[in-house]
Image: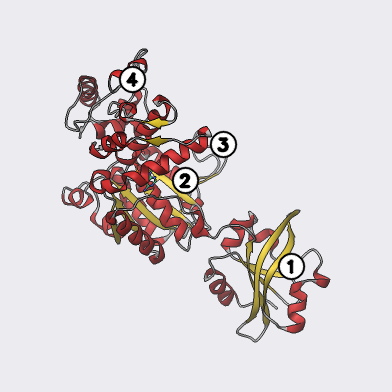
Amino acid sequence: MQINSFTLNSLLETHDLPFIIVNAAQQIVGVNRAWENHFGQTRESILGNACCNNPGDCRHRRFFQTLEPYAGLFSDTLDEREYLLKVRGYPLLDTDGTLYLGESVLTAGASEPQDKSPKMVGTSSAFINLKSNLQKAAQSNVPVMLNGETGTGKELAAEFIHRQSQNAYGEFVIVDCTVLGEDLFESELFGHEKGSFTGAASAKKGLFELADGGTLFLDEVGELPVSLQPKLLRALESGQFRRVGGTTSLTSTVRVVTATHRNLGEMVRNGLFREDLFYRLSVFPLEIPALRDRIEDMPALVGHFLKSFGQRDCCVYSTTKAAMQKLMQHKWPGNIRELKNCLQLATCLCKNHTIDELDISIMRRQGATLKPGMIERRGQGAVIEDTGASNINPLDTIEAEFIRSLIKKYQGNRKLIASEMNISERTLYRKLNRLNIN
Ligand SMILES: Nc1ncnc2c1ncn2[C@@H]1O[C@H](COP(=O)(O)OP(=O)(O)OP(=O)(O)O)[C@@H](O)[C@H]1O
């Protein structure tokens, strides 16, 4: 007898852990998405299979004899691989009175989704407040919008939300909205069928489809052209989309997290961002504070990065008091990413694994390089030093003038500008940001 499909689906979808349903004939009649993700098998390939390699004598058979719930460690073979599993089994009754066994399964020793959260470091009240809000956002399942300057940790925060959410067993899929132009948007986001355009040699799943059951992270969503925003809104509202060249409507259930450094409210007022999409995406808005506004986090962040560089280089790095003071005084326009890069360079320059003030070279110029002799001059002063956040150095001025001339030449078309500069659109976008060019 078939289990009532409504009961089955609702049961399966209420479980965050891998979960299977077994009938009295010891056949698998249901698995959830977490199970598929955890063991890398599709439900089509296992539904109807025997529950174990030896169904004549297994815990499932014993369950149907005793009807006793059970919990414990069991060794199972799946797809020719041996797994030690933490298992909990209990009876399920279908609406027509048929008895089934429901079993939640986890690889023994494998961490719970929460344990896989990226390491976010900080001790300031601003950081603790942020982390607590991220946790609340993760549990709520509503769309979250992260707002913050470049390098403040928006992507890390988005991944943290994903790992702490009920979608943690699904994929965390990043969509870089700075590179999504008219030509790429639909095929990247919704995928395409074979032969749907020149070069589409095979069918390809889109990012929306890949994120099914997981989290879709729309990075720099403020960069999405207004003309494409209705298409995104439609897919988010209905959960339905079609691959380019496809005729069937596909469905994807995704958790949406977005990030931007822009003031989207102002963009809405200026007609640069659709109001309906803004409200759809920013149900849970969160501000990621700049490093300069939580400078108390500096010792913890420095300790965190030096520990990881030390593990990489098999040594223990430390800083002098003067070095820490210098780090605390800088304004950090590039935020945590800039701090990390600065420390990475310091580990190369320092002697005896101890970073002192003179090893702290705060580099504000993208692409600035150490010239021969600079390292030798270490004893006489900082190598590349610029602590005044408002100073624009001549290199930046020249670069800004060059980019402005290209903006004029290509009437603001980023693709053409990036191509002439031989850089990606994303790098161009970062340069525009750093040089304050709108
Ligand atoms: N609280 C934190 N603890 C440890 N590392 C952090 C923290 N915040 C950010 N980082 C690190 O700083 C770097 C920049 O973070 P991330 O890429 O998440 O920033 P972002 O705001 O998304 O940047 P962008 O705006 O350029 O996309 C990464 O290496 C990240 O791991």
**CB atoms of marks 3 and 1 within 8 Å:** no
Q: Which residue sits at x=26%, y=25%?
A: 385
Label 1: which residue? 51
Q: Kindly report the distance in space between the C-alpha atoms of the residues bearing marks 4 and 2.
A: 57 Å
User: Which amino acid does the dot numbered 3 rest on?
Assistant: Ala
In this view, the residue farthest toward the top is 372
**Callout in the foreground (2, 1):** 1
First of labels 3, 1 by sequence position: 1
Q: CA distance from mark 2 to mark 1?
A: 39 Å
Instruction: Please name the residue that numbered disc 2 is placed on.
Output: 244
Can residue 199 be seen at all in this image of the molecule? no
Is disc 3 in contact with disc 4, using a CB cutoff of under 8 Å?
no
Residue type marked 1 = Cys
Residue 435 found in image quarter: top left
Mark before the other along the chain sequence, 4 or 2: 2
Residue annotated with mark 4 = 378
Q: Residue at x 36, y 15 (%)?
A: 376
On the image, the x and y values in percent for residue 239 come to 43, 59
Check disc 3: other Cα within 10 Å, few if <14, some if 14-19, many if 20+: few
Q: Nearer the viewer, residue 140 or 308?
A: 308
Residue 411: percent from left, percent from top: 22, 28
Height in image: 337 above or below 370? below
Residue type (three-letter) at the residue carrying disc 2: Val
Specify how the rendered protein is coloured. secondary structure
